[in-house]
Amino acid sequence: MKHIVVQGGTDGMGRAIALAYLKRGDAAVIIGRDQRKGESFLAAAEEIGAGARASFIRADLSLISENERVIRQITADLPAVDALVLCARHFLAPRRETAEGYEATLALFYLSRYLLSYGLRDVLEKAPQPVIMNVAGPGSPVGEIHWHDLEFTRGYDGVDAQMQGGKANDLLGVAFADKYGAIARTRYVLFNPGSVSSSFSGEYDAPTRAHVERLKRIAKSPETAIVPVMACLDAPPADPVTAFVEGWQMSLDDASFDLNDARRLDAKTRELLSR
Protein backbone atom coordinates (compact mmCIF):
# COMPACT_ATOMS: atom_id res chain seq x y z
CA MET A 1 0.00 0.00 0.00
CA LYS A 2 1.33 3.41 -1.01
CA HIS A 3 1.04 6.54 1.15
CA ILE A 4 0.23 9.73 -0.78
CA VAL A 5 0.35 13.24 0.72
CA VAL A 6 -1.49 16.00 -1.17
CA GLN A 7 -0.95 19.66 -0.34
CA GLY A 8 -4.10 21.47 -1.44
CA GLY A 9 -6.06 18.23 -1.62
CA THR A 10 -9.48 19.56 -0.65
CA ASP A 11 -10.41 20.61 -4.18
CA GLY A 12 -9.67 20.22 -7.88
CA MET A 13 -6.78 18.07 -9.03
CA GLY A 14 -5.48 17.47 -5.52
CA ARG A 15 -8.76 15.94 -4.38
CA ALA A 16 -9.08 13.92 -7.61
CA ILE A 17 -5.58 12.46 -7.17
CA ALA A 18 -6.21 11.54 -3.54
CA LEU A 19 -9.51 9.81 -4.36
CA ALA A 20 -7.94 7.96 -7.29
CA TYR A 21 -5.32 6.46 -5.00
CA LEU A 22 -7.90 5.57 -2.39
CA LYS A 23 -9.89 3.69 -5.03
CA ARG A 24 -6.77 1.66 -5.80
CA GLY A 25 -6.40 0.60 -2.19
CA ASP A 26 -3.71 3.09 -1.19
CA ALA A 27 -3.72 5.63 1.67
CA ALA A 28 -4.06 9.39 1.15
CA VAL A 29 -3.48 12.37 3.42
CA ILE A 30 -4.78 15.72 2.20
CA ILE A 31 -3.80 19.09 3.65
CA GLY A 32 -5.93 22.23 3.40
CA ARG A 33 -7.45 25.05 5.37
CA ASP A 34 -11.17 24.50 4.66
CA GLN A 35 -12.71 22.23 7.30
CA ARG A 36 -15.93 21.78 5.32
CA LYS A 37 -14.08 20.64 2.19
CA GLY A 38 -11.89 18.35 4.26
CA GLU A 39 -14.93 16.70 5.77
CA SER A 40 -16.47 16.37 2.29
CA PHE A 41 -13.34 14.51 1.15
CA LEU A 42 -13.52 12.18 4.15
CA ALA A 43 -17.19 11.50 3.41
CA ALA A 44 -16.34 10.67 -0.21
CA ALA A 45 -13.67 8.29 1.03
CA GLU A 46 -16.22 6.56 3.26
CA GLU A 47 -18.56 6.14 0.32
CA ILE A 48 -15.95 4.15 -1.62
CA GLY A 49 -15.01 2.06 1.40
CA ALA A 50 -11.70 3.84 1.98
CA GLY A 51 -12.49 5.81 5.12
CA ALA A 52 -9.83 4.03 7.19
CA ARG A 53 -7.17 4.97 4.62
CA ALA A 54 -8.09 8.66 4.27
CA SER A 55 -6.86 11.53 6.45
CA PHE A 56 -7.33 15.29 6.48
CA ILE A 57 -4.93 17.72 8.14
CA ARG A 58 -6.39 21.16 8.56
CA ALA A 59 -3.68 23.78 8.17
CA ASP A 60 -3.14 27.30 6.87
CA LEU A 61 -0.21 26.54 4.60
CA SER A 62 0.61 30.20 4.08
CA LEU A 63 2.10 30.08 7.60
CA ILE A 64 5.61 28.73 8.11
CA SER A 65 4.67 27.40 11.54
CA GLU A 66 1.74 25.45 10.12
CA ASN A 67 3.93 23.82 7.48
CA GLU A 68 6.38 22.83 10.19
CA ARG A 69 3.54 21.34 12.25
CA VAL A 70 2.32 19.35 9.24
CA ILE A 71 5.84 18.04 8.59
CA ARG A 72 6.14 16.88 12.20
CA GLN A 73 2.75 15.17 12.10
CA ILE A 74 3.30 13.35 8.81
CA THR A 75 6.80 12.26 9.81
CA ALA A 76 5.44 10.86 13.07
CA ASP A 77 2.35 9.20 11.55
CA LEU A 78 3.59 7.61 8.32
CA PRO A 79 6.25 4.91 7.87
CA ALA A 80 7.08 6.32 4.43
CA VAL A 81 5.66 8.72 1.83
CA ASP A 82 5.57 7.41 -1.73
CA ALA A 83 4.40 10.65 -3.32
CA LEU A 84 4.12 14.27 -2.23
CA VAL A 85 1.76 16.21 -4.50
CA LEU A 86 1.90 20.02 -4.30
CA CYS A 87 -1.22 21.78 -5.58
CA ALA A 88 -2.21 24.61 -3.19
CA ARG A 89 -2.56 28.14 -4.48
CA HIS A 90 -4.86 31.11 -3.88
CA PHE A 91 -5.06 34.20 -6.09
CA LEU A 92 -4.96 37.58 -4.36
CA ALA A 93 -5.71 40.74 -6.33
CA PRO A 94 -4.83 42.92 -3.31
CA ARG A 95 -1.48 42.45 -1.59
CA ARG A 96 -1.75 40.68 1.76
CA GLU A 97 0.72 39.70 4.43
CA THR A 98 0.38 36.62 6.59
CA ALA A 99 0.31 36.80 10.39
CA GLU A 100 4.02 35.97 10.23
CA GLY A 101 4.76 38.96 7.98
CA TYR A 102 5.31 37.26 4.62
CA GLU A 103 3.63 38.28 1.36
CA ALA A 104 0.76 35.80 1.16
CA THR A 105 1.06 34.59 -2.46
CA LEU A 106 4.76 33.87 -2.11
CA ALA A 107 4.13 32.17 1.23
CA LEU A 108 1.45 29.77 0.00
CA PHE A 109 2.46 29.17 -3.61
CA TYR A 110 6.20 28.89 -3.08
CA LEU A 111 7.42 28.84 0.53
CA SER A 112 4.98 26.10 1.55
CA ARG A 113 6.12 23.90 -1.34
CA TYR A 114 9.75 24.59 -0.46
CA LEU A 115 9.23 23.66 3.18
CA LEU A 116 7.26 20.49 2.45
CA SER A 117 9.69 19.34 -0.26
CA TYR A 118 12.70 19.56 2.02
CA GLY A 119 10.91 18.83 5.29
CA LEU A 120 9.44 15.52 4.09
CA ARG A 121 12.52 14.37 2.18
CA ASP A 122 13.63 11.91 4.87
CA VAL A 123 10.26 10.12 5.00
CA LEU A 124 10.07 10.15 1.19
CA GLU A 125 13.45 8.42 1.02
CA LYS A 126 11.99 5.50 2.98
CA ALA A 127 9.73 4.63 0.02
CA PRO A 128 10.97 2.44 -2.87
CA GLN A 129 10.23 4.95 -5.68
CA PRO A 130 9.51 8.32 -4.04
CA VAL A 131 8.41 11.31 -6.09
CA ILE A 132 7.52 14.95 -5.51
CA MET A 133 4.93 16.25 -7.98
CA ASN A 134 4.88 20.06 -8.08
CA VAL A 135 1.83 21.21 -10.07
CA ALA A 136 2.69 24.80 -10.87
CA GLY A 137 3.13 25.65 -14.55
CA PRO A 138 6.55 24.96 -16.09
CA GLY A 139 6.87 26.11 -19.66
CA SER A 140 4.98 29.37 -19.21
CA PRO A 141 6.45 32.10 -21.44
CA VAL A 142 5.47 34.80 -18.94
CA GLY A 143 6.59 35.57 -15.42
CA GLU A 144 9.91 36.39 -13.79
CA ILE A 145 11.65 36.36 -10.42
CA HIS A 146 11.65 39.83 -8.87
CA TRP A 147 15.08 39.34 -7.36
CA HIS A 148 15.25 42.63 -5.49
CA ASP A 149 11.68 42.52 -4.18
CA LEU A 150 10.41 38.94 -3.95
CA GLU A 151 7.54 40.02 -1.69
CA PHE A 152 6.31 42.86 -3.93
CA THR A 153 6.59 45.56 -1.29
CA ARG A 154 6.34 48.01 -4.19
CA GLY A 155 4.07 47.76 -7.21
CA TYR A 156 2.20 44.57 -6.28
CA ASP A 157 0.14 42.91 -9.00
CA GLY A 158 -1.76 39.68 -8.33
CA VAL A 159 -1.02 38.15 -11.73
CA ASP A 160 2.69 39.03 -11.49
CA ALA A 161 2.82 37.46 -8.02
CA GLN A 162 1.26 34.23 -9.32
CA MET A 163 3.58 34.14 -12.33
CA GLN A 164 6.61 34.65 -10.10
CA GLY A 165 5.39 31.77 -7.95
CA GLY A 166 5.38 29.49 -10.97
CA LYS A 167 8.92 30.44 -11.94
CA ALA A 168 10.06 30.03 -8.33
CA ASN A 169 8.68 26.49 -8.27
CA ASP A 170 10.57 25.66 -11.48
CA LEU A 171 13.78 26.73 -9.74
CA LEU A 172 12.80 24.85 -6.58
CA GLY A 173 12.77 21.59 -8.52
CA VAL A 174 16.15 22.33 -10.07
CA ALA A 175 17.68 23.28 -6.71
CA PHE A 176 16.29 20.16 -5.03
CA ALA A 177 17.80 17.93 -7.73
CA ASP A 178 21.07 19.87 -7.56
CA LYS A 179 21.35 19.09 -3.85
CA TYR A 180 20.09 15.52 -3.74
CA GLY A 181 19.78 14.13 -7.26
CA ALA A 182 23.06 12.21 -7.14
CA ILE A 183 22.52 10.69 -3.70
CA ALA A 184 18.76 10.27 -3.25
CA ARG A 185 15.95 8.19 -4.74
CA THR A 186 13.36 10.98 -4.64
CA ARG A 187 12.51 12.35 -8.08
CA TYR A 188 11.18 15.87 -8.59
CA VAL A 189 8.53 16.40 -11.29
CA LEU A 190 7.30 19.83 -12.37
CA PHE A 191 3.92 19.64 -14.06
CA ASN A 192 1.81 22.11 -16.04
CA PRO A 193 -1.68 20.58 -16.45
CA GLY A 194 -3.05 23.38 -18.63
CA SER A 195 -6.48 24.82 -17.84
CA VAL A 196 -8.32 22.75 -15.28
CA SER A 197 -11.85 23.29 -13.97
CA SER A 198 -11.55 23.81 -10.23
CA SER A 199 -12.71 26.32 -7.65
CA PHE A 200 -10.13 28.87 -8.89
CA SER A 201 -9.64 29.83 -5.25
CA GLY A 202 -8.93 33.51 -4.81
CA GLU A 203 -9.97 37.13 -4.51
CA TYR A 204 -10.13 38.56 -8.03
CA ASP A 205 -10.39 42.00 -9.53
CA ALA A 206 -12.89 42.40 -12.36
CA PRO A 207 -10.51 41.89 -15.34
CA THR A 208 -8.91 38.80 -13.82
CA ARG A 209 -12.30 37.37 -12.88
CA ALA A 210 -13.46 37.79 -16.49
CA HIS A 211 -10.35 35.95 -17.68
CA VAL A 212 -11.01 33.13 -15.21
CA GLU A 213 -14.59 32.80 -16.43
CA ARG A 214 -13.32 32.41 -20.00
CA LEU A 215 -10.86 29.74 -18.84
CA LYS A 216 -13.63 27.81 -17.13
CA ARG A 217 -15.42 27.40 -20.46
CA ILE A 218 -12.47 25.59 -22.04
CA ALA A 219 -10.95 23.93 -18.98
CA LYS A 220 -10.69 20.16 -18.67
CA SER A 221 -12.10 18.30 -15.69
CA PRO A 222 -9.77 17.41 -12.79
CA GLU A 223 -10.37 13.72 -13.54
CA THR A 224 -9.10 14.23 -17.09
CA ALA A 225 -6.21 16.46 -16.03
CA ILE A 226 -4.79 13.96 -13.55
CA VAL A 227 -4.34 11.12 -16.08
CA PRO A 228 -0.79 12.15 -17.17
CA VAL A 229 0.01 13.23 -13.61
CA MET A 230 -0.87 9.77 -12.30
CA ALA A 231 1.32 8.20 -14.98
CA CYS A 232 4.33 10.11 -13.63
CA LEU A 233 3.44 9.28 -10.05
CA ASP A 234 3.09 5.58 -10.84
CA ALA A 235 6.36 5.42 -12.77
CA PRO A 236 8.59 8.38 -11.77
CA PRO A 237 11.03 9.51 -14.47
CA ALA A 238 14.62 8.36 -14.08
CA ASP A 239 16.11 11.86 -14.08
CA PRO A 240 16.38 13.73 -10.77
CA VAL A 241 14.17 16.57 -12.10
CA THR A 242 11.83 16.67 -15.09
CA ALA A 243 9.17 19.04 -16.41
CA PHE A 244 5.97 18.28 -18.30
CA VAL A 245 3.26 20.27 -20.06
CA GLU A 246 0.03 18.24 -20.20
CA GLY A 247 1.97 15.00 -20.34
CA TRP A 248 4.62 16.14 -22.84
CA GLN A 249 8.13 16.29 -21.41
CA MET A 250 9.89 19.60 -22.00
CA SER A 251 13.58 20.37 -22.23
CA LEU A 252 15.31 21.75 -19.15
CA ASP A 253 17.44 23.93 -21.41
CA ASP A 254 14.72 26.57 -21.04
CA ALA A 255 15.82 29.64 -19.05
CA SER A 256 13.16 28.82 -16.46
CA PHE A 257 15.41 26.04 -15.16
CA ASP A 258 18.73 27.89 -14.98
CA LEU A 259 20.92 26.24 -12.34
CA ASN A 260 22.59 29.47 -11.22
CA ASP A 261 19.18 31.09 -10.74
CA ALA A 262 18.03 28.03 -8.80
CA ARG A 263 20.98 28.29 -6.44
CA ARG A 264 20.47 32.03 -6.08
CA LEU A 265 16.79 31.64 -5.23
CA ASP A 266 17.54 28.85 -2.78
CA ALA A 267 19.94 31.14 -0.91
CA LYS A 268 17.42 34.00 -0.87
CA THR A 269 14.70 31.62 0.32
CA ARG A 270 16.79 30.46 3.24
CA GLU A 271 17.40 34.11 4.12
CA LEU A 272 13.64 34.76 4.06
CA LEU A 273 12.89 31.76 6.24
CA SER A 274 15.51 32.76 8.80
CA ARG A 275 13.62 35.94 9.67
Image (cartoon, rainbow, N blue to C red):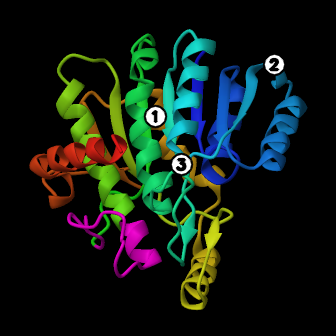
> Residue 80 shows which numbered tag?
none
Residue 40 in the image: state x and y as whole percent: 84, 44
Front in this rendered view, residue 243 or 76: 76
The residue stretch that appears in magenta: 142-163
Q: Secondary structure at mark 1?
A: helix
Specify the quadrant that holds the C terminus: top left
Is there CB contact under 8 Å for labels 3 and 1? no
- Residue depicted at 55% across the width and 21% down the height: 72
> Residue 87 shows which numbered tag?
3
Front in this rendered view, residue 235 or 242: 242
Q: CA distance from mark 3 to mark 1?
A: 12 Å
**Tag nearer the camera, 1 or 2:** 1
> Residue 52 shows which numbered tag?
2
Label 3: how many Cα within 10 Å (few below 14, some 14–19, many 20+)? many
Would residue 21 be seen by someone viewing this image from the given angle?
no
- Looking at the image, residue 148 lies above or below residue 135: below
Instruction: Please say whether residue 100 is one of the residues in the magenta stretch.
Output: no
Given the current orientation, which residue lies at the most extreme bottom position?
207
Residue at the spot of label 1: 116
Label 2: how many Cα within 10 Å (few below 14, some 14–19, many 20+)? few
Residue 122 in the image: state x and y as whole percent: 40, 16
Lateral position of residue 237 relative to residue 90, left or right = left
Q: Secondary structure at mark 3?
A: loop
Front in this rendered view, residue 263 or 243: 263
Specify the quadrant that holds the N terminus: top right
- Residue depicted at 66% across the width and 29% down the height: 29
The answer to which of marks 1 and 2 sits earlier in the sequence is 2
Residue 222 in the image: state x and y as whole percent: 63, 54
- Looking at the image, residue 106 lies above or below residue 78: below
- Residue depicted at 56% across the width and 9% down the height: 79
Q: Give the residue type at disc 1.
A: Leu
